[in-house]
Image: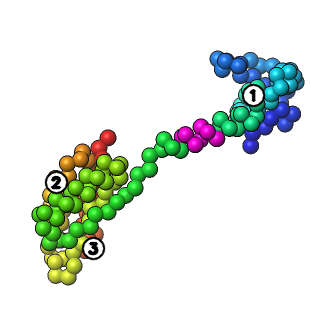
Amino acid sequence: MITINNEIDAANVKLVKEDGTGVEIIPTSEALSMAEERGEDLICISNSGDIPVVKIEDYNKYMYNLKRKAKDKQKKQKSCDTKEIVISDVIAEHDLDVKAKHIDKMLNDGDKVLLTIRYKGRAVKFIDEGPDKLYHLAEKVTAPYKIEKKPKINGNTVSMMISAKN
């Protein structure tokens, strides 16, 4: 909650200069009268110390700028999704090439890719070959990547995680 004008209940305040270069400690009543002369508000921007830090500015303009900065900050955040590519244990070489192209596109979009091989039925006895097949698939990827999680056997699946190299 932002306190403004008469809601500030401290004897003295640190007033931020107009150009933002420094602060000066003055009585709250003097800061309020300065704000009223300009037709603006006295806004408390930090109340963490023993003396609150205040600024003379229009309250609506201050709130608008805060919301705009928060929106810009949210836009700059990059979301990273995890996509999964599932292959079978008896996949053909051409199909691996096609999957590698899909992985390239996902990595270029900034997503992490979980490569998974699912073994069914009697094929589970060949599960030890899974990590080698995943490395073979990863070698076909042309986009720069790094291995985040090495191949791991978990039940009847083998999976590894790769992400774009920054």
Q: Disc 1 on helix, strand or loop? A: strand
Give the residue at x 16% y 54%: 140
Amino acid type, label 1: Glu
* Residue type marked 2: Lys
Q: Amino acid at mark 3?
A: Gly
Closer to the camera in the image, 68 or 161: 68
Task: Locate residue 163, reporting x and y percent.
Answer: 31, 50
Can residue 149 be seen from the camera position used here? no
The residue that appears at 75% across and 39% down in the rendered structure is 2
What is the image's colouring?
Answer: rainbow
Name the residue located 19 percent from the left edge and 60 percent from the top edge: 98
C-alpha span from label 1 to label 3: 63 Å
Direction from residue 14 to residue 132 in the image, left or right: left
Q: Regarding mark 2 in the picture, which secondary structure is present there?
A: helix
Is residue 14 shown above or below 64? above
Instruction: Report the mark closest to the observer, 1 or 3.
Output: 1
Task: Give the image quarter of residue 50.
Answer: top right
Task: Please give the residue where the numbered disc 3 appears in the rendered image.
Answer: 155
Q: Would you name the residue on which mark 1 appears? A: 57
Q: Quadrant of residue 144?
A: top left
Tell me whether circle 2 and circle 1 mark residues in contact (CB < 8 Å). no
Which image quarter holds the N terminus?
top right
Q: Please say whether residue 71 is one of the residues in the magenta stretch.
A: yes
- Total residue callouts: 3
Highlighted range, magenta: 67-73
Indicate which disc residue 140 carries. Answer: 2
Q: Position of residue 156 (x, y in %)?
A: 25, 74
